[in-house]
Image (tube, coloured by chain):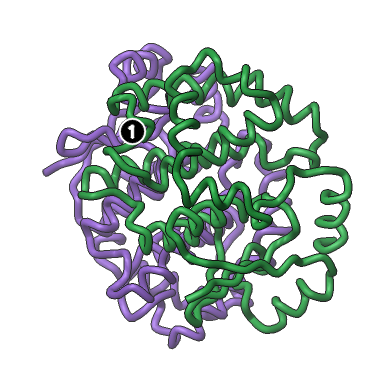
Chain colours: A green, B purple
Amino acid sequence: MSATLFYFDGRGKAEIIRLTMAAAKVPFTQVDIRQKQQFEALKAEGKLVFGQLPLVEYEGNNLVQSCSTARYFAAKGDLLGANEQEKLNVDILFEGTRDFNSAFMSYGFAGFTEVLDNAKKTAIPKYLPVFNSVLLRNGSNGHLVGSKLSLADIGLLEVILTIEELLGEDELKPYPEVQNFLKVMKSNDAIANYLRSDLRRKKNDEKYVAEVKRVLY
Amino acid sequence: MSATLFYFDGRGKAEIIRLTMAAAKVPFTQVDIRQKQQFEALKAEGKLVFGQLPLVEYEGNNLVQSCSTARYFAAKGDLLGANEQEKLNVDILFEGTRDFNSAFMSYGFAGFTEVLDNAKKTAIPKYLPVFNSVLLRNGSNGHLVGSKLSLADIGLLEVILTIEELLGEDELKPYPEVQNFLKVMKSNDAIANYLRSDLRRKKNDEKYVAEVKRVLY
């Protein structure tokens, strides 16, 4: 069954859901929220428990809270780990990728260069060595846990794609395991197809930031 | 088997873990981190994947990332929902309680009255009506999902206890379902025992804020 994602025409909090649905092979379409009245209509219909986007309509459920939605589809795609130990490690490492990712969420909203400068000073030197080590300890197979794709990988992929696009691939050079991870991820057909498709939205720009603010305020 | 929690001598990011372990009836002891060298020793031993507290040692695992740790113990205590639909709702509502709770996490670190004034202006009028409605729609039984205690309840309890203590119970008066929820939670023996015990730490004060800063910086 197909899912419908309601979000702004950008990555933001929806990107982890899109990547997870793609990896789990759940087909989805998107409704871009461009006008305040579309957002207000969703709220009035009672579809947004906390009055926030993203929303995914799927099999009669109104899925909100992006991490919950990602976990829900990851479960459908068997991406949460093969046993209790793996499940624990996937959950911990996924949460770590969310902290790492948060350094980039305000890109454009709290300036463009300012957000990147700050990430280079704090989040990148904190998290890239950690994930490089975890990948090494897991056997340099391009996965954070076990020997196949998991939600932890998808969470890390989101951040690494951001770094590659906004700061350049040279930023990853000191972290060979992370470079290998990115190569392995891009060789996953489901992920590669998604990244090439027009389901993948563009990085934040001035126009996007203005559109989001117009809808929200 | 007993768990050992390593954290500062306060609630902070560890409180959701303590409440969950109590509700799941997992016995635990606490090691208070008061000196920088204790913190550095845990890092040097490789127990803190992301270099952050809280840490729980349990059955040979080094559990980090507080939400993952809470989910782990909630699973042990059968507090994640009785079926797929309940599991989804528990996960979504728990995430919502984390957003709500974040309004109070900087209490003392970003001022005392400032944090409370801000919470009264934004988080409280946003989230209390939502949780009041969810409780009503679930049948006014004092639980957010189904007919028994879940991690979503525990997450909400943490915030409501904070509001009761820091702002007074009158703050809850416009929300009768939330008042009833608090009464039901306090009548849970495992939770009541925990709240009466010295495992429950005090609200943040100047001394605590200084101690945390001394360990971290």
Give the residue displayed 49% in from the left and 17% down from the top: A175
Q: Is residue B161 visible?
A: no
- Along the horizontal axis of the image, is A173 left or right of A131? right
Q: Is residue A183 above or below residue B164?
A: above
On the image, which quarter does residue A71 sit in? bottom left
| Along the viewing direction, whichever of A202 and B44 lies nearer the viewer | A202
Q: Which residue appears at 66% of the width and 36% of the height?
A: A104
Q: Quadrant of the N terminus of chain B?
A: top left
Q: Quadrant of residue B141?
A: bottom left
A173 over A202 or under it: above or below:
above
Q: Under tag 1, what secondary structure?
A: strand
Front residue of A147/A80: it is A147
Q: Residue at x 35, y 79 (%)?
A: B146
Q: Is residue B153 above or below residue A106?
A: below
Instruction: Indicate the position of residue B72 as horizontal and vertical percent values.
Output: 29, 50
The residue wearing badge 1 is B55
Q: Chain of mark 1?
A: B
Quadrant occupied by the C terminus of chain B:
top right
Residue A95 drawn at (x, y percent):
45, 42
Identify which residue is drawn at 52% across, 27% down. Answer: B207
Say which amino acid is labelled 1.
Leu
Q: Quadrant of residue B99?
A: bottom right
Q: Residue B122's x, y, as percent?
A: 72, 58
Tell whether A24 sits left or right of A122.
Answer: left
Where is residue A148 drawn, in percent x and y?
A: 32, 42
A92 relative to B32, above or below: below
Q: Is residue B45 left or right of residue B176?
A: left
Residue A11, can we see it?
A: yes
